Amino acid sequence: MLYYLSFLREEFGPFRLFDQFTFRAGGALLTALVISFLLGPVTVKLLKQFRAQAPGRHDGLIPDEYIDRNKDKTPSMGGLLIVLSITVSTLLWTIPSNPLMAVFLSTLIAYSALGFIDDYIKVAFRDRGGIPAKLKMFFQILIAVVAIMILRRLPETSGLLDSLIVPFVQDPISMRGYTWLMLVFAVFVVVGSSNAVNLTDGKDGLAVGSTIFCSLTYAAIAYLCGHKIFSGYLNIPFISGVGEVVVFAAAISGACIGFLWHNCHPASMFMGDTGSLALGGTIGLIAVLVRQEVVLIIVGGVFVMEAASVIIQVASFKLTGKRVFLCTPIHHHFERKGWTETQIVVRFWILAGIFALIGLSTLKLR
């Protein structure tokens, strides 16, 4: 909404800044950060009054003796604060008439609502399982399909699934005639990203800190896609109106930074599925929009490590009866190896930063 102040530039010159999405991206980041930071104590108090302490995650991969019972006392569902901060900041700083914002905000809220129901079942009924896995996956896929199909029908992104960009390959690979295959791949990226962030959310500040690096990287990529000269030079798609996605991604970063103040060790609250599903899903959707789905494997390397460790562990145990890792997701493996929680989180943050830089470099090294 603040964009409309740019119409008053003749009356007050500095208002022209609100016409620049780079300025509004900075404003969105700061706004989301402040909201998340200031409302954190209130959120923690309300969650404790609601008794939103969820029982420890139990998915058959973590033995009961390895579950940290002290964390059972920390309220979950803090993702409500993250989503609120992103939503308010996005509505304030983006152009309301931009259709991309309606899609991304709707996807954010839809995934958050799904996660909230899952968290609520765990909290209210003391059920570690939450929503049945197959039903949860069905709704995740449904949300992704609807969002991607809507994006594909927008004039700005009508060729959304017509090409595939592969790191270190100069020209995009044409996928015309294979729309159904690209749709499956795009849905896999969104749903996979959503679940990967969810699996990473097992240590104080681990998932939200890694998300900051990932969202900032995709904000930069979206900026390049919205600039005709840069997109032409890097041979990546030029997307009209994608500047508002930069603002949205910046809001994600700001909300995560503010939330990290309350989520760092020892955490005052956890984001829960309410936040992790929403953050992962929307970052995956940004990757699909800017045609950098494969690069997400690099940029989101920490999330990929966490998800891959679970897949490998389950496959190995079912096929051979043996475990590859001491415990999964992989941060629990290093915990069993003697790393402290702080060591795990900080080292994974360092990896997230390195992966982000490598991912950005692939845009030039083609």
Image: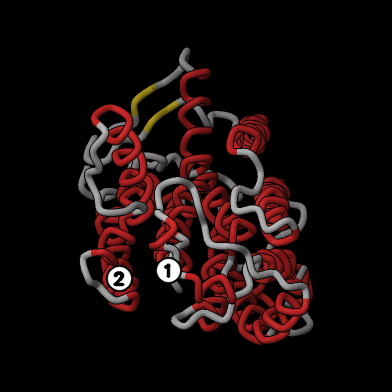
* 242 lies above or below 321: below
* 315 lies above or below 285: above
Could you say which is closer to the camera, residue 147 or residue 345? 345
| Residue shown at the point (21%, 65%) measured from the top left | 337
Q: Secondary structure at mark 1?
A: loop
Q: Which mark is residue 344?
A: 2
On screen, residue 267 versus residue 206, left or right, reads right
User: Can residue 358 be seen in the rendering of this structure?
Assistant: yes
On screen, residue 226 versus residue 28, left or right, reads left
| Residue shown at the point (47%, 25%) measured from the top left | 182
List the residue tagged with mark 1: 203
Q: Secondary structure at mark 2?
A: helix
Say which amino acid is labelled 2. Answer: Ile
Q: Residue furthest top?
A: 177
Quarter of the image with the N terminus in it: bottom right
Image coordinates of residue 342 in percent, x first then y, are 33, 78
Q: Residue furthest front?
A: 65
Q: Quadrant of residue 116?
A: bottom right
